[in-house]
Amino acid sequence: MQFKRLKILMIILFISLDTFLFVWWRSNRPDSVQVTDANTSIIAEMKHQNIQLSKFSTKIPYANYLAGKQSDKLISLSGKVSDYDASVKNQKLSVNFKTPQSIKSSGSKNETSKYIGNQIDPTALAYSAGYQYNKILSYEQGAKQGIYSQKIDKLPVVSQQGLFVVNYDKDGKATGFTQTKISHITELRDERVTLSEEDAIVSLYRFNELNSGDKLSKGMLSYDSALKVNGYDIYTPVWLFVVTHSDGERDTLKINAFTGDNLSE
């Protein structure tokens, strides 16, 4: 009972603090016309500095605070295949193929497409389990990994708690995969307005995350874990981008979609 009370208290304190900061930020923010004009000027400045931007949206989306627990109900592989080693540790399934696999998946979600002979098609396995290809996270990894996100509240998860990750060797053959899953998903409050994709891009520039010659991907509104309270992970909406620097290096950039804080590592 004490743990339950502590959990509720922590969630209330967390949301109350964030609500206060959000209201303060909104109250000190210029009106929408001024913001639009300021954004337009900053976007023009970025282009002048040869920062390449993808086509972005000015639409204002809605999102929520969510809570969820790590699930123990992970994928069970068919007894028809045996060319792999599997283990589960800390609610994470890890599968290593004894022989790298060069199966080219069609992206089918049919049960029969997951297994071909004695081999596993990890891509079909991810789709059939409800994960969706995450272009931004995969792009950051290059050819090393293909990353698929679980969806909660209609948005993809970008934290480690809800991903299906396929690993590849230098020849492009799959060497195995890992899976984590979120369950007991609960809304902590009603939906509220978030920053637009344009707002998030401007925030990245103001935080000096973008430099001359950089190329920024299209943003993706996603859920990322913020903290853990009594076994529950708290999820906050974030705008996720990948920036490609002039030297070819890639980095993931994140902006809190409620407050505009820079969450990039």
Image: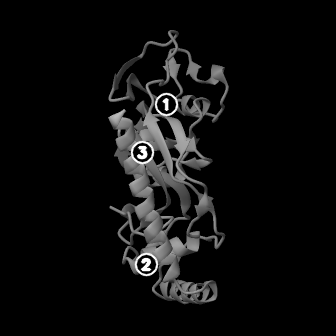
Residue 173 shows in the view = no
Tag 2: amino acid: Tyr
Residue 106 shows in the view = yes
Which residue is rendered at x = 38% and y = 73% of the image?
209
Q: Please tell me whether mark 2 or mark 1 is closer to you in this view.
A: 2
Residue identified by numbered label 2: 205
- Looking at the rendering, in which quadrant would you find the C terminus? bottom left
Which residue is rendered at x = 35% and y = 39% of the image?
230
3D distance between C-alphas at marks 2 and 3: 37 Å
Tag 1: amino acid: Ser
3D distance between C-alphas at marks 1 and 3: 49 Å
Tag 3: amino acid: Ile
Camera-side residue: 148 or 103? 148
Mark drawn on residue 102:
1
Q: Earlier along the polypeptide chain: callout 2 or callout 1?
A: 1
133 shown above or below 203: above
Helix, strand or loop at label 2? It is helix
